[in-house]
Image (cartoon, grey):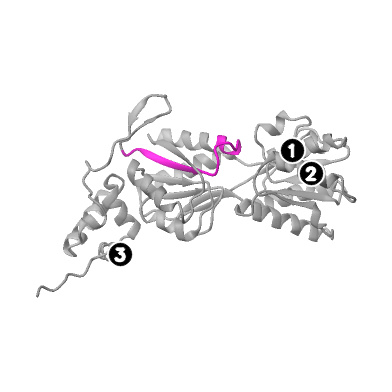
Amino acid sequence: MEKQKIKITVREVAARAGVSTATVSRAFNHKGIVNPKTYQSIMEAATALDYKQETAGDISPNRAPVISYTNRNNSKKAVDKRLLIINIPAISNPFYTEIIKGIQSSALNHQFDFLLYSGHIKESSIDTFLELVDYVKAQGVILLNLISEELLARITEIIPVVQCCEYTQNEFASSVGINDFTSTQRAMDYFLSTGRKRIGFINGPLSYKFSQNRLQAYYKAMETAGIEVQSQWVIQLPDLSPDMAFSSVVKLLSMPDAPDCFFAVSDVLAAAAIRAAHYCRLKVPGDILVIGFDNTDISHLTTPSITTVNQPKFQLGFLACELLCEKIRNPESEVKHMLLNTELILRESTAVGAFTAKGY
């Protein structure tokens, strides 16, 4: 009886070729983004090991399905392996607008278009996402959602990935972000410098890294100042909803020993806090000081304008795409983790004129 052959795996091909499994996967599924010399080594290793290509899929350049989509010029164009996927939590959040503009600027320089994929990538949706990656023959992914390392590893096995804003220090994917902890501490130091001690905190979902780190910085600053935090001072929201923030702040301001300052993890929540203070017939900044985060358009359109922590949003997006294009050109390039500086921009909601404190 004929002896059954042992199935050769991608890992064995990678070991023989002296490359990573991710590079082997890209060679079989996206030949055009792998260095020709590396590609040749992988093919020679696969042939020597009698690796069956159908395990990884037909690598014929004619295999890729052609889809149509609306590009930046509002015209129809066939996808021809020059496509990136941008995964964002929600398209309604204005914070992502400037980041996407930064990504677009870099992508155009490198002759890429991109698709926006809105929603979280979880265990229940990872297969659907990977099917999309394969279907459109994307060459890279920028993740603005926090994702588990297990799922991140699955994605990087088949395609280059860069994390933007929400990130983990890992060996799989480069990242670009800010230091949420020190940025929040700077805002808290400003509040404390005014002599006020009843500082409220309006937070978003704890599933986000920024919510966790900014909350930790809040507690640390209050502890360092010797101030005991009242449990009701921390408003923990299940979503970045201005309506929920408004209702929560109104309720809190009706309680004894209510805060006379609010730090909000986003400008939309800070705007809701200002509206709630006005509803309670309190003056901002006379009775209540407010600081937001992100420096989105709403921060200078409200009355009063909002003191806020500015994130270099355009630069975050641009640099994330630059790192991704570098990884596409050279799959063996090192993983990089970069943090950009923020600025505390003081406006009317803290009774200070235009002034910028840089370097945080």
Residue drawn at (64%, 46%) of the image:
239
The quadrant the N terminus occupies is bottom left
Q: Which residue is mark 2?
A: 249
> Is 275 drawn above or below residue 48 in the view shown?
above
- Residue 244, image quadrant: top right
> Is 247 drawn above or below residue 147 in the view shown?
above
Q: What element does badge 2 sit on?
A: helix
In the rendered structure, does residue 309 fall within the stretch colored magenta? no
Q: What element does badge 3 sit on?
A: helix
State the image coordinates of residue 278 (x, y, percent, origin top left). 83, 34
Q: Which mark is residue 11?
A: 3
Marked residue nearer the N-terminal end (1 or 2) = 2
Please state which of residues 57 and 223 is positioned toward the viewer in this rendering.
Answer: 57
> Is 252 drawn above or below residue 335 in the view shown?
above
Q: How far apart are the alpha carbons under marks 1 and 2?
A: 8 Å
Q: How far apart are the alpha carbons under marks 3 and 1?
A: 52 Å
Q: Are marks 3 and 1 in contact (CB under 8 Å)?
A: no
Q: Are marks 1 and 2 in contact (CB under 8 Å)?
A: yes
Q: Which residue is mark 1?
A: 272
Q: Type of residue at label 1? A: Ala
Residue drawn at (43%, 42%) of the image:
85
Mark in front: 2 vs 3: 2
> Is 317 drawn above or below residue 15 in the view shown?
above
* In the image: residue 73, left or right of residue 7: right
Please state which of residues 300 and 236 is positioned toward the viewer in this rendering.
Answer: 236
Residue drawn at (78%, 35%) of the image:
275
Q: Using a 10 Å C-alpha cutoff, classify the residue at mark 1 as few (fewer than 14 neighbours), some (14 to 19) or many (20 or more).
A: many
**For the magenta stretch, what is the residue range?**
81-98
* In the image: residue 204, left or right of residue 349: left
Q: What element does badge 1 sit on?
A: helix
Residue drawn at (42%, 33%) of the image:
108
